[in-house]
Amino acid sequence: MDRKRATIVFSIIAVAAIAGASIPLDYSELISSPDPSANGSVLSPIQENNNNGSGNNDNSTSTASEGNFRVIEDPSLPQVNDANLRVEKVIEGMDLPTSMAFLDNDDLLILQKDNGIVRHVSNGTLLQGGVLELIVDNEDERGLLGIAVSNEADSSGTRTVFLYYTESADGEEVRNRVYRYDWTGSVNLSGETLVLDLPGTPGPNHDGGKLIMGPDGMLYAVIGDLNRDGKLQNIPDGGAPDDTSVILRVDHEGNAPGDGNNSVLSDSDAQVSDSLSRYYAYGIRNSFGIAFDPVTGALWDTENGPDQYDEINVVEPGFNSGWDQVMGPIERTDKTIDNLVQFNGSQYADPVFSWLISEGITDIEFLNSTRLGDRYTNNIFVGSVNNGNLYFFTVNDDRTGLTLDGSSGLADFVADNTAELSAVTFGTGFGEITDIETGPDGYLYILSLNGSLYRIVPATS
């Protein structure tokens, strides 16, 4: 929901969550105090470490667990509704973490939104300082937002890392940019190269920011509408496509792959045609989650509604998500497909699931592992920020949608009330979930804006 932006302390968020209030995703509302780096300064590793209280895990308050991580004792752990599974806290002390990426079995990078620091977890320990410190514009939902890592290392063992962040310098216009870096297994990221230069205004919310490498080796990046009203927001008489409300599919240089698989490729206006060549999807209000089905290779996303109809979508090439004409099933609106801006090669599809009342839906993850049992293998987990819930969904047999129990009232694939919501709620108490990943160990990792990284493991491990 778009409302006046104000800095709200965590305690207010907690009270609202307990009361069941709907608080649309807005990172600025989750910050308890202004960040010292908000005006362009970057904290030194020592300052940043002192602000967090702990630059690494203290083994004196931990117990042994499987793998490199140590379990951190916490009397208020999140809970899941499967007695065969349990939640562990494995990292704490981060500052507003937004996204993470495993580099290998031993190395994990985690982004901190406001101070622009890329944290390094090595052999289960959060190292002091960071492997990269960036000057970011962190107003509202701006900041250091997304990370993706190349699927394979090159012959020298170097991995390519992509970062999405908001920046402005020397009075320049605020921009959302994606840069490419090299990771050689050393202590920092090097070789910064600009890949995508995207709008940042008017905003300051709806910046999107999630990145993912596709099974095709292409980079996928999502950006929200930035409160613009153009053709990409399905406004027929709006401005020409401008790199907002889209999922971009590009090569490692930021160019359209040229293989014809983006589908939104042509229009009678040559200017529009040039703009569309990198678009895989459009009509997206804002998204904090994109993931590939490990079985079919199909792209799925989550999308935030204003105060109603958060969504899960299957994103085929040329997908038009409908914003701002449609959120949720189109039959629940007074619109038809004729109200949408349809470019050549594009198509609209209803979401495969919707939340009537906005939950602040964030990341989506297919658990690409058998470690938690057959029920969860290659099925979907989705996070939220409003109530700290983790949702679980089973993909249908042809993997084009979801299988839901009709007796729960979800035959229409919309959670209309609390009872229907509880039918898909898997876990509670995670705080503001910002990222979900399958770890190299096959367990499910959940990142929270409260500074913690949780892991779901078998109860007997």
Image: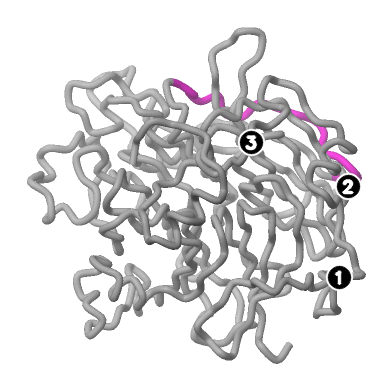
- Residue that label 3 marks: 33
The mark that comes first in sequence, 1 or 3, is 3
- Residue type indicated by callout 3: Ser
Q: Position of residue 57 (x, y in %)?
A: 86, 61
Numbered range of the magenta stretch: 184-201
- For this view, does 430 lie left or right of residue 417? right
* Image disc number at residue 415: none
Q: CA distance from mark 1 to mark 3?
A: 28 Å
- Residue that label 1 marks: 61
Q: How many neighbours does mark 3 have within 10 angstroms: few (below 14), some (14-19), or many (20 or more)? A: few
- Residue type indicated by callout 2: Gln
- Residue type indicated by callout 1: Thr
- Residue that label 2 marks: 128
Q: Quadrant of the N terminus?
A: top left
The answer to if 220 sits in the magenta stretch is no
Judged from the image, the secondary structure of the residue bearing numbered disc 1 is: helix
In the orientation shown, which residue stands out farthest toward the top? 171
Q: How many neighbours does mark 2 have within 10 angstroms: few (below 14), some (14-19), or many (20 or more)? A: some
Q: Quadrant of the C terminus?
A: bottom right
Q: Tell me: residue 320, above or below residue 458.
A: above
Say which of marks 1 and 3 sits in front.
3
Q: Position of residue 381 (x, y in %)?
A: 49, 68
Contact check, label 2 and label 1, Cβ < 8 Å: no
Residue drawn at x 86%, y 55% as measured from the top left: 56
